[in-house]
Amino acid sequence: MNYQARVVCIDDEPGIVELVTMILSSRNIQVEGAFSGVDGLALVRRDPPDAVILDIMMPGMDGWEVYRQIRADSTLKNIPVIILTARNSSFEEVIARSRAGVDDYVTKPFLPNDLRNSLAKVLKTVKLS
């Protein structure tokens, strides 16, 4: 199958990875999942995707550390990263996101169109409507 884009979803909740896969695969987006920061980072390094959807609150290596390592790697630093988290978008979080240079932010629980619109925003060549 010829996909529009390939996305890596890193989340310690398998149900979220499954939901993201279901939402995006219906729009011809290939999704590969990883259930830990360490595994996700290894997957991104092994085969760099078009975008990363990244949970922040994970045991072990959290999402911010994965994000820092992606941005510090010259071969990965331009990959768009969408932060996916259960936290509400408080003022402090918005400031932190802005300073970190995160490409976009989706808060759980989310609607399918929230995720599709976020991905379309960071991958301008992808048609998700």
Image (cartoon, helix red, strand yellow):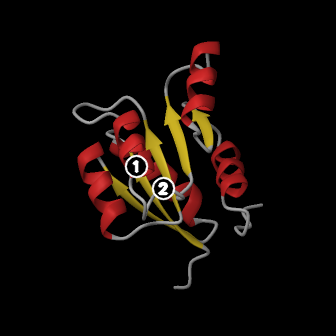
Rendered residue at 59%/29% (across/down):
99
* Image location (x, y in percent) of residue 9: 43, 52
| Percent position of residue 93, x then y | 57, 20
Which of the labelled discs sits on residue 29, or is there none?
A: none
* Residue visible at 38% across and 56% down in the picture: 73
What residue is at 67 percent from the left and 48 percent from the top? 118
Q: Quadrant of residue 29?
A: bottom right
Q: Is residue 36 visible?
A: no
| Camera-nearest residue between 109 and 39 | 39
Which secondary structure lies at badge 1? Answer: helix
Q: Residues within 10 Å of mark 1 (few under 14, many from 20)?
A: few
Left or right of 62? Residue 29 is right
Look at 60% across and 37% down and name the residue there. Answer: 105
> Type of residue at label 1?
Ala
| Outermost residue toward the bottom in this view | 1
For the C terminus, give its image quadrant: bottom right
Name the residue carrying label 2.
77
Q: How many marks?
A: 2
Is residue 86 placed above or below 103 in the rendered structure?
A: above
Mark 2 lies on a secondary structure that is: loop
Disc 2 residue type (three-letter): Lys
**Relative depth, front residue between 59 and 102:** 102
| Residue 21 seen in render | yes
Residue 123: x and y in percent read: 67, 61
Residue at the right extreme, as displayed:
129
Pointer 1 with pointer 2, Cβ within 8 A? yes
Q: Where does residue 87 sit, x and y in percent of width and height?
A: 51, 21
Residue 46 vs 94, above or below: the answer is below
Q: Whole-Å distance between the Cαs marked 1 and 2?
A: 6 Å
What residue is disc 1 on?
72
Looking at the image, tell me whether mark 1 or mark 2 is earlier in sequence order.
1
The crowding category of the residue bearing disc 2, from other C-alpha atoms within 10 Å (few below 14, some 14 to 19, many at least 20), is: some
